[in-house]
Amino acid sequence: MIILKLGGSILTNKNSKKAEVNYTNLNRIANEIKNALINKGMDNFINNNSSDQGLVIIHGAGSYGHPPAKKYEIGKNFNNDEYPKKRIGFSKTQICVKKLNTIICDILVNHGLPCVSIQASSFITTKNKRINNFNLDSIEKYIDEGFIPVIYGDVVLDDELKVAVLSGDQILQYIAINLNLSSKSNKKEVILGTDVNGVYTKNPKKYDDAKHIPVLTSLDDIDELDSTTNIDVTGGMIGKIKELLELAEIGIESKIINANEHGAILDALNNKNIKGTKIK
Ligand SMILES: Nc1ncnc2c1ncn2[C@@H]1O[C@H](COP(=O)(O)OP(=O)(O)OP(=O)(O)O)[C@@H](O)[C@H]1O
Ligand SMILES: C=C(C)CCOP(=O)(O)O
């Protein structure tokens, strides 16, 4: 079972205040995923043969979701008289990330990948920003039938905060821990594509002396817990690492790679040893 996260910094121009898709990356990565599935003999997605492998894709919100979520402060406490404005902000943010997901699924399907869109805001809830209700049945059924579920960072109802932002990284962690498949291998390969070569001792975009960390086992390995350089309402790289370290604690390894590198997704899906950071 492959769990693949495509970061918003790859699929969109995350620095942009406008919602901008990086179509060059998206089309290249769609092609790499398809070629990897064929190499792995998982082309049942295309030829409808049985296979014991499955794939679920999670993507970030990038410049589609983070700006509106920040503008309306989704997830921050608010007074009751502010709820009408907060609801509109929630609705606008949900539409923005849904638009991004539709564009991504269109491109993946046009590359022959039988993707199905899964909208977190329609069935997942959180309590204090942590998932407390996420039924995996439909995702498991889709995978058993040879589809590729594509779920994404979204806004959700929160039992304490009323509304919150749910990151793709938290969705990835929950799926990696809880997904159980009847007809596919449950051994999980967790791969996250972002726009840097993995984790460094500090932000490599801000510090020339940042050193690459090939294997990360603790936040102590990082000198400076820096936020991401773009608009990010879900914790950026540090938020990502925290989710992945919780996976490592229960024996599920993951790897952060640079999906800007041509062929990186293809090689990672084909278990080639490529530059990145293993979290274990
Ligand atoms: N110690 C660090 N090592 C590596 N990158 C870091 C570090 N600190 C901050 N960063 C920044 O984190 C960014 C990647 O995190 P980000 O959350 O933006 O990735 P993403 O998964 O593509 O986005 P999203 O979570 O929205 O899908 C890099 O562009 C980098 O500038
Ligand atoms: C900003 C929203 C709505 C979702 C954030 O998800 P992420 O980009 O995976 O962190």
Image: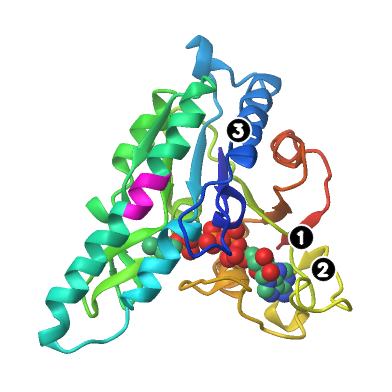
Q: Which badge, 2 or 3, comes first in the chain's sequence?
A: 3
At mark 1, the secondary structure is strand
Query: How far apart are the alpha carbons under marks 1 and 2?
Result: 6 Å
**x then y, percent, for residue 49:** 51, 11
Residue at (60%, 57%) from the top-left corner? 9
Residue at image mark 1: 277
Q: Residues within 10 Å of mark 1 (few under 14, many from 20)?
A: many
Quadrant of the rendered structure where residue 187 is? top right
> Which residue lies most toward the front here?
18
Q: What amino acid is found at the position of numbered circle 3 in the picture? A: Asn
At mark 3, the secondary structure is helix
Question: Is residue 132 in view from this perspective?
Answer: yes
Name the chief secondary structure element in magenta.
helix
* Magenta stretch: includes residue 175: no
**Magenta span:** 96-100
| Closer to the eye: label 2 or 3 | 3
Give the number of the disc on residue 27.
3
Note whether 117 is above or below 9 in the view shown: above
Q: What amino acid is found at the position of numbered circle 1 in the picture? A: Thr
User: Where is ligand 2, by quadrant?
Assistant: bottom left
Residue at (77%, 45%) from the top-left corner? 261
Q: Residues within 10 Å of mark 3 (few under 14, many from 20)?
A: some
Note whether 190 is above or below 137 in the view shown: below
At mark 2, the secondary structure is loop
Residue at image mark 2: 213
Q: What amino acid is found at the position of numbered circle 2 in the picture? A: Ile
Quarter of the image with the N terminus is top right
Q: Are marks 1 and 2 in contact (CB under 8 Å)?
A: yes
Quadrant of the rendered structure where residue 128 is? bottom left
On whether ligand 1 comes within 8 Å of the CB at mark 2, the answer is yes
